[in-house]
C-alpha cells in the first residue's frame, strides 16, 4: 500500500508574503470594482505549484485566529510591535478562503492558538501513522517540526522558491537537531515575534553555546563552566527571558483541534466553482489554465444555409431581426470572420460566406430591418471591414445585460444568456479556447448560430422590460447604444502612429540607458548586472554602505519604494531610478506600440464598454489610456500625428471632473464655493487641511499631499493607501483624511448617506441611474463590508463622471456631422477627448468642443474644459 501524503500550508504566513510579493505593483492588481487581488493571485499560483509538486492525498491550510493566543497571555508584548494588517490585505482574505473551498482544500483556525500549533499537531499525528508530510511556510520557526517523515518547505523568494528542511539539512546548516531550533530562538530572541532572548546574543553566539551545551536547560545547569565575561553576565541576568522565549518559540503539538487527519482528504478542485471565482476576480491567467467547460449535448435546431441562390427567402418583417458576424478572436479589427447568421421569428439563415453580406440585396435587406445583436460595436467594426453598413442596430444584448448586472465578468454569449436563465452553450465549449480555438464542423457551427439567434430574439423583450422597470431604459437607448456606434467610428478611424518618430525616441532612450549604465558603474566603482536585484543590493548596501531599508530572505530589497527613500543618500540611487524608468519606456511603449501598428500605419484600439462597474471605458490592443502624460514618457505622444498634411491634433479635457461631481452631489458649500470662484482646488484643500490663511503659504509639497487626499477621497482610499501614495505614516494619513472631512463636512455627510442608501436598497446610482450592486454591504465579515461601504461612497462620483463624458462624446459626434466638419474624434483617454482635423477648423473646434462638453450635464458648479491643439498629441497637450 502506497504511503499517504499530507500537505500542510501555513496560510497566514504565505497569504501575507503573497501580499507583499507584489506589494510595489499592488495598484495594478485590482478588479474593475477596485478589489485588490495581488495576494489572491500570488497565493493561488503558489497553491497550484505546491499541489502539483507534492501531489498530496490530504491537505490543510492553517490560519491564525484573530485575537490573542496563549502566548500573548504569557507575554503581553508578543508580536505587539506589528502594525495592524492593511485593509488592502484584509479585504482579500475572505476570497483566499473561498479560493481554498473551490480548490477542495480544507482550511482551519483555532481560537487561542496559532497556525503553527495546528500544523504541528497534525504533523505529529501524521508521523504516528507513518505518513509522508510536507509543510509549506514562510516562517523558519516551523523547521523545529522536521522529522524523518516530515519536511518543512520554507519559501526563499516570494512564495515560489522552496528550501527543504529535513533533519539532515538542519544539521548541515546549523549543526543542530530540529528540536534545538527552539533553544536557538530562546537564546537569540525574535524581533519578528518580539520576544527578547538574551541581551547581545545573536545567531553566531547562540549556535556556539548550543554546540557546547545542547540546550538552554543544560547551558544554565552548567553555567559555571563559562569564563567570566559580559556574555556570561547577560546570560545570568536574562535566564528568565531565555526560558520564556524558548517556551514562546515552542510549537504546541497537542493543540485541541476539532478536526483530524481523516477530515483532510483531497479529491481535487470544483472546476465550475473555480471558473466562476476566477471570472469574478478577473484572474484571466488562472482562468486560461482551467480545462474548457464540457459542451452539453444539444438538441438539433433548424436552419437554412443562405447562398446567393436563395436570397429571396429572406422575409420582409416588422419584427426584430437577430444578426451576428462571428469571429473566434477577441480583436475584431483583425480576427478572421468565420460566418454570420440572420434570425427572424420564422427562420434562421446561416452562412460561412461573409461576402454575401456585401451583395446589394442583402445590404438593403439589413438596412430595412431593426437588428438585435450581441455586442454592437464588434459587429459594426467587423461589417465595416467588409464595406457593409449596419445602420439599424437597436438592441445589444451585451450592453443591456451589463446595465442590469454590472458585475458580469464575461463577454461570452453563452455565459450572458445563462445569466438570464436561457440555456445556451458557452462559445469556448463549441470553439475551444486559447490556441486550441477552431471552427467546428458546419453542422455544429450552424447549430450554434441558430441557437444564438433564438437567444437574441427571446431575451430582447425580457431585458427591455427589466431595463424599463429599473429606470434604465434611457441609459441604454440614449447613452450606451449610441455610444457604441460612436466608439465604433472612432476605432475604425484610428490614429496614425509615426513609427520613425517612435523608433527615434527608442534610440534616444537606448543611448540614455547606456550613458546611465556607465555613470552607475563609475559611481559604484565596478561593473555588475544592473538588472540583478541581488548584485544591485550588494553594491548599494555592502560596497557603498547605504542604509538598509528592507531585507528579504535572499538579500536586500531594491524595490522602487526602497530606492525612493534613498534618493538623498547617494547620486547613484537617482541614476538607477532613471535607468529603470527609461528601460520601461523602451520596452512598454516603443516595442509595444510599434507591434500594435496596423498596415494603414494606424493604431486601432478597442474600447471595452462593459468592463468596469463604474461605467468607465477601458482600452486594449493597445491600451491608449495608459500612454504617459507626464515626465519623459510624455515624449511618446510626439509619435501620434494627424492622418493628413495640414491637419492638427486637437485635445479637450475636463478639469477635475470627479471633484466637481463630488461638490455637486454632496452639496458641500466650501467645495462648491472654491469651484465657483475658480480657485485651485488642491491649493484650497491644502489651505484648509494645514490651516493656512493664504494660498501663497501653500508649498508645492503641501499641494501635492492635498491633491493626493482630494483624489484619494474620491476613490475611497484608506489611511494605508494614502500613506503609501504620498510617503507619510498611516497616523499622518489618517489625520489628513480626518482634517479633510472637517473642512468639507458635507462631503462626510454624503459618504455616510451613500452607505445608508446602499444598506437600504442594495445598490447606489450615478446621476444617470447607472446602478452598482453591493452584495457585501450587510456582510458579517468586516473587511468585505468595509470594502462595500467605500464602494458605495465613490461609485456615484466616478460613475457620474464617466457618464458625463459619454454624453459629451455622443453630442460631439452629432455636432461634427451637423456642422459638416472634416474633423474626427479619435480617442477618449479618461477625461480627455482627442480629435484630428484641418488646421482651418481648429478655431471652430476650440469654440464648439468646450461648449458641447460643458453642457453635457447641468451641475451646481461649472464644468471646466481646457483645449489645445498642435502638430502632434504632445503639442496638443
Image (cartoon, helix red, strand yellow):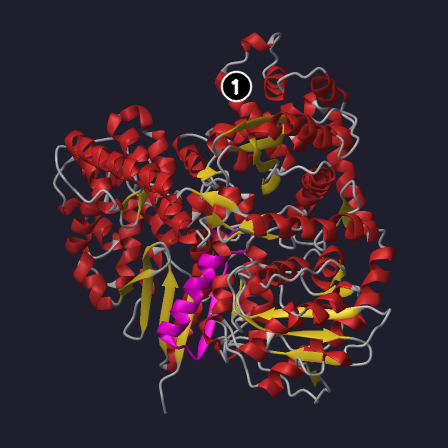
Which residue lies at the image location 54% right of the left edge and 72% below the top edge?
A: 259
Q: Is residue 515 above or below residue 668?
A: below
Does residue 385 appear to the left or right of 243 in the view shown? right
Q: Could you say which quadrant of the image residue 752 lies in?
A: top right
- Residue sitting nearer the eye, 215 or 262: 262
Does residue 686 appear to the left or right of 180 in the view shown? right
- Mark 1, Cα crowd under 10 Å, few <14 / some 14-19 / many 20+, is some
Q: Could you say which quadrant of the image residue 562 lies in?
A: top left
Give the percent coordinates (x, y) of residue 862. 74, 24
Q: Can residue 166 be seen at all in this image of the molecule?
A: yes
Q: How many marks?
A: 1
User: Magenta includes 64?
Assistant: yes
Q: Can residue 256 be seen at all in this image of the molecule?
A: no
Give the percent coordinates (x, y) of residue 32. 60, 51
Which segment is the magenta one?
41-70
- Residue sitting nearer the eye, 782 or 296: 296
Give the percent coordinates (x, y) of residue 645. 48, 36
Give the percent coordinates (x, y) of residue 258. 56, 70
- Residue sitting nearer the eye, 510 or 691: 510
Look at the numbered disc 1 and give the secondary structure of its residue: helix
Which residue lies at the image location 53% right of the left edge and 79% below the top edge?
A: 439
Where's the N terminus, which quadrant?
bottom left
User: Magenta includes 628?
Assistant: no
- Residue sitting nearer the eye, 531 or 492: 492
Which residue lies at the image location 79% right of the left edge and 75% below the top edge?
A: 344
Q: Is residue 562 above or below residue 40?
A: above
Question: Where is mark 1, residue-wise?
Answer: 702
Amino acid at each position: 500500500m502506497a504511503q499517504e501524503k499530507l500537505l500542510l500550508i501555513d496560510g497566514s504566513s504565505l497569504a501575507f508574503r503573497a501580499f507583499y510579493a507584489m506589494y510595489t505593483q499592488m495598484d495594478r492588481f485590482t478588479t474593475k470594482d477596485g478589489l485588490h487581488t495581488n495576494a489572491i493571485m500570488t497565493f493561488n499560483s503558489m497553491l497550484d505549484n505546491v499541489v502539483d509538486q507534492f501531489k498530496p492525498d490530504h491537505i490543510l491550510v492553517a490560519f491564525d485566529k484573530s485575537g490573542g493566543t496563549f502566548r500573548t497571555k504569557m507575554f503581553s508584548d508578543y508580536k505587539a510591535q506589528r502594525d495592524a494588517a492593511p485593509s488592502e490585505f484584509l479585504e482579500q482574505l475572505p476570497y483566499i478562503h473561498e479560493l481554498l473551498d473551490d480548490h477542495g482544500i480544507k482550511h482551519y483556525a483555532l481560537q487561542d492558538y496559532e497556525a503553527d500549533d495546528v500544523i504541528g499537531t497534525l504533523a505529529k499525528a501524521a508521523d504516528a501513522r507513518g505518513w509522508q508530510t510536507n509543510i509549506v511556510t514562510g516562517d523558519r520557526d516551523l523547521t523545529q517540526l522536521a522529522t524523518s517523515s516530515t519536511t518543512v518547505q520554507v519559501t526563499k523568494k516570494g512564495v515560489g522558491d522552496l528550501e527543504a528542511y529535513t533533519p539532515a539539512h538542519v544539521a548541515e546548516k546549523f549543526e543542530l537537531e530540529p528540536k534545538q531550533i527552539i533553544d536557538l530562538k530562546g537564546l537569540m530572541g525574535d524581533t519578528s515575534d518580539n520576544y527578547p532572548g538574551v541581551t547581545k546574543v545573536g545567531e553566531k553566539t547562540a549556535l556556539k553555546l548550543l554546540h557546547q551545551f545542547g540546550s538552554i536547560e543544560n547551558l544554565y545547569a552548567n553555567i559555571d563552566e563559562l569564563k567570566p565575561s559580559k556574555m556570561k553576565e547577560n546570560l545570568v541576568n536574562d535566564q528568565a527571558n531565555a526560558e520564556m522565549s524558548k517556551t514562546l518559540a515552542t510549537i504546541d503539538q497537542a493543540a485541541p483541534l476539532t478536526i483530524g487527519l481523516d477530515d483532510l482528504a483531497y479529491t481535487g478542485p470544483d472546476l465550475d466553482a473555480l471558473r466562476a471565482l476566477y471570472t469574478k476576480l478577473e484572474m484571466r491567467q488562472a482562468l486560461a489554465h482551467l480545462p474548457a467547460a464540457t459542451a452539453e449535448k444539444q438538441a438539433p435546431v433548424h436552419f437554412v444555409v443562405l447562398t446567393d441562390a436563395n436570397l429571396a427567402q429572406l422575409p420582409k418583417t416588422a419584427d426584430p431581426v437577430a444578426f451576428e458576424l462571428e469571429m473566434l478572436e477577441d480583436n475584431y479589427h483583425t480576427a478572421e470572420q468565420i460566418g454570420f447568421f440572420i434570425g427572424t421569428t420564422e427562420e434562421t439563415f446561416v452562412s460561412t460566406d461573409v461576402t454575401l453580406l456585401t451583395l446589394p440585396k442583402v445590404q438593403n435587406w439589413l438596412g430595412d430591418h431593426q437588428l438585435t445583436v450581441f455586442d454592437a460595436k464588434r459587429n459594426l467594426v467587423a461589417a465595416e471591414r467588409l464595406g457593409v453598413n449596419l445602420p439599424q442596430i437597436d438592441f445589444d444584448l451585451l450592453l443591456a445585460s451589463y446595465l442590469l448586472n454590472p458585475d458580469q465578468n464575461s463577454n461570452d454569449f453563452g455565459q450572458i444568456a445563462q445569466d438570464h436563465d436561457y440555456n445556451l452553450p458557452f462559445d469556448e465549449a463549441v470553439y475551444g479556447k486559447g490556441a486550441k480555438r477552431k471552427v467546428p464542423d458546419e453542422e455544429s457551427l450552424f447549430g450554434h448560430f441558430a441557437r444564438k439567434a433564438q437567444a437574441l430574439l427571446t431575451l430582447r423583450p425580457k431585458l427591455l422590460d427589466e431595463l424599463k422597470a429599473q429606470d434604465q431604459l434611457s441609459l441604454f437607448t440614449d447613452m450606451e447604444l449610441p455610444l457604441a456606434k460612436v466608439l465604433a467610428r472612432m476605432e475604425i478611424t484610428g490614429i496614425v502612429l509615426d513609427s520613425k518618430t517612435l523608433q527615434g525616441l527608442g534610440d534616444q532612450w537606448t543611448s540614455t540607458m547606456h550613458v546611465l549604465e556607465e555613470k552607475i558603474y563609475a559611481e559604484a566603482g565596478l561593473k555588475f548586472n544592473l538588472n540583478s536585484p541581488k548584485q544591485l543590493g550588494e553594491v548599494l548596501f555592502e560596497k557603498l554602505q547605504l542604509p538598509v531599508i528592507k531585507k528579504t530572505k535572499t538579500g536586500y530589497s531594491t524595490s522602487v519604494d526602497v530606492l525612493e527613500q534613498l534618493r538623498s543618500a547617494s547620486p547613484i540611487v537617482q541614476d538607477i531610478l532613471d535607468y529603470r524608468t527609461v528601460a520601461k519606456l523602451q520596452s512598454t511603449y516603443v516595442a509595444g506600440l510599434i507591434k500594435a501598428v496596423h498596415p494603414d500605419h494606424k493604431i486601432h484600439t478597442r474600447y471595452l464598454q462593459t468592463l468596469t462597474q463604474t461605467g468607465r471605458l477601458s482600452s486594449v490592443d493597445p491600451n491608449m489610456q495608459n500612454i504617459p502624460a507626464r515626465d519623459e514618457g510624455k515624449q511618446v505622444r510626439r509619435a501620434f500625428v494627424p492622418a493628413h498634411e495640414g491637419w492638427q491634433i486637437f485635445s479637450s479635457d475636463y478639469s477635475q471632473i470627479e471633484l466637481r461631481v463630488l461638490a455637486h452631489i454632496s452639496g458641500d458649500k466650501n467645495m462648491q464655493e472654491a469651484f465657483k470662484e475658480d480657485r485651485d482646488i488642491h491649493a484650497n484643500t491644502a489651505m484648509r487641511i494645514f490651516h493656512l490663511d493664504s494660498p501663497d503659504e501653500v508649498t508645492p509639497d503641501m499641494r501635492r499631499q492635498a491633491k493626493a487626499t482630494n483624489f484619494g477621497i474620491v476613490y475611497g482610499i484608506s489611511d494605508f493607501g494614502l500613506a503609501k501614495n504620498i510617503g507619510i505614516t498611516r497616523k499622518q494619513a489618517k489625520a489628513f483624511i480626518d482634517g479633510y472631512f472637517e473642512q468639507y463636512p458635507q462631503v462626510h455627510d454624503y459618504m455616510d448617506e451613500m452607505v445608508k442608501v446602499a444598506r437600504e436598497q442594495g445598490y447606489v446610482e450615478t446621476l444617470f441611474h447607472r446602478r452598482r450592486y453591493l452584495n457585501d454591504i450587510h456582510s458579517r465579515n468586516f473587511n468585505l463590508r468595509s470594502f462595500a461601504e467605500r464602494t458605495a461612497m465613490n461609485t456615484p462620483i466616478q460613475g457620474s463622471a464617466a457618464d458625463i463624458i459619454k454624453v459629451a462624446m455622443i453630442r460631439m459626434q452629432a455636432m461634427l456631422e451637423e456642422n459638416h466638419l472634416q474633423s474626427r474624434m479619435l480617442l477618449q483617454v479618461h477625461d480627455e477627448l482627442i480629435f484630428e482635423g484641418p488646421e482651418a477648423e481648429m478655431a471652430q473646434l476650440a469654440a464648439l468642443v468646450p461648449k458641447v462638453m460643458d453642457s453635457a450635464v447641468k451641475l451646481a458648479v461649472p464644468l471646466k474644459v481646457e483645449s489645445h491643439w498642435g502638430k502632434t498629441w504632445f503639442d496638443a497637450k
